[in-house]
Image (cartoon, rainbow, N blue to C red):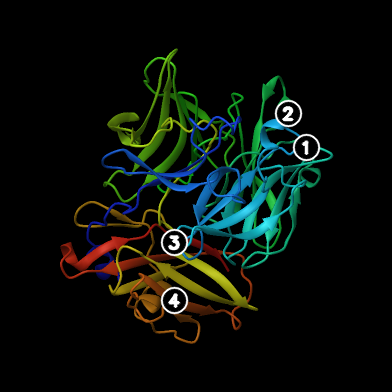
Amino acid sequence: MVGFLATLAAAQPHPGGILMGAGHPRPTDRNFLQGHYLVDKTTGVLTTFADTVAGPGLPFKWYFTTMDVDNRSVVVGTGGYTQDPWYSVYNVKNGVFSYDPATKKYTTLAYNVNDFQFIFGVAADQDGRWYFDAWGLPKVKWNIYRTDAGGGSYSTALTTVQLGHSLSLHYPLHRDIDSGDLLICTEGSAVTSVIENPVYTLAPGGTYGTFNWSGHGALPSMGLTQEIETGDILWQLSNQIFRLSGGRQSKSTMITLYMAQREFAYGMIYENQSAASPLLITYAVQQLSNSTSASLRWIDPKQNYAITRTVRFINTGSFDPVPYQYRHIAHLGDRYIQTVKTGPRKWDVLFNFPTLPGMKYRVAAGLSGIRPGFRTPDNRTVWLNPGPLVYLTVNNLIPTIWNPGPLELDTRGHGRGYMNLTAIPQLGIPLHLVAMVLDSSASNGIAFITEPYPFRL
């Protein structure tokens, strides 16, 4: 078992470009981006992924984005303030939608023109349901909502009344890589003259707790990501990066980046496949008196957060290449593993590698955590600790409980396995999945290694 994992080769970087959502507060100004845009990580060329204004009936403002469970469509939270005259010229759609770039159509997962005036975060749970936070009218309120599997209806999952605070929830949602719980970032109230902003957890069963409280008045509002090596949350605001450790009383740590005058960093994600030391990718905007410019920057946390690479945006269209209103960027096509509940204690396990069709794959599941994992010969880390279940799942020795599927991706790069846990009690402990795509032409025969996927038993 250890020998098998120790021979894993270097994984490829995330193959897709960078997706980002945009929407200017004055939608009649078509010089600004509206919709979703794709940035080439090598050239910086910016292309339209979905224009929300050009097509009648499309959602207006797209803020946060993530890949749908099929790893082809994109799930977005949208919104438009119906009482604002700037929005009156459009058919405002407030809700959560799945957009298919092939058909240029969207499917409604949840819609309410009043309850969902603005949606600022979306995340999928281990059952394939979507969680999102929304601000609504007529009485201002913030709630966490949950769709059913496949969408179409929704219910309230958590309210600020339950949390016992007057809070704003208009910040990113994220699944904790260790527990699989939903992380909910909030804006709190003044405590002992210091603004404290709690980050809460919400388990699949509905129980909630506290991850930690951020200090310094630092809101986890833009570019929320999680560091696999430590489990810490990282986010950025203006020209600073903040770090928050879970389960400890330490406050967030501010790290000031060196940036040009009036340059601000917004969206941020990890490129865990890019190097032995994972890199942060940030989206930065420089705003001067008569011009603006935008770029992607690669930052190495192991080198005192040094900027190691910069790619400036290149736009071939007529619009300004600087999205104004957005708070999230995402890798295109990075939902490599997703579980979807199909019945009591039963789940399909979807494997999605759209750039590697027809390749063979293997999957390992473990109950012993993800750190320290295994180091590969080329100094990469496989984030899965050894244990009996790793051996059993890699070798497919418990088919009535765990079946990894055909072990060969179809022409779309998809595979489907299943878990049947009806004979296993609800333990409440996390299980982690790691998938590996095989390629005889790659070093050691492994083309790609996923990040760990958390699942709470």
Q: Is residue 108 above or below residue 398?
A: above
* Of labels 1 and 4, the one closer to you: 4
When asked about the image quadrant of residue 320, the answer is top left
SS category of the residue bearing label 4: strand
Q: Where is mark 4, residue-wise?
A: 416
Q: Is residue 398 above or below residue 47?
A: below
Give the CA distance from mark 2 to mark 3.
45 Å
Label 3 environment density (alpha carbons within 10 Å; few <14, some 14–19, many ≥20)? few
User: Which residue is most to the top?
Assistant: 289
Label 2 environment density (alpha carbons within 10 Å; few <14, some 14–19, many ≥20)? some
The residue located at (32%, 73%) in the rendering is 361
When asked about the image quadrant of residue 301, the answer is top left
SS category of the residue bearing label 3: loop
The residue located at (31%, 62%) in the rendering is 355
Mark 1: amino acid: His
Mark 3: amino acid: Ala
Q: Earlier in the sequence, mark 3 or mark 1?
A: 3
Q: Where is mark 3, residue-wise?
A: 102
Of residues 382 and 268, the one nearer the viewer is 268
Give the CA distance from mark 3 to mark 4.
22 Å
Residue 17 visible here: yes
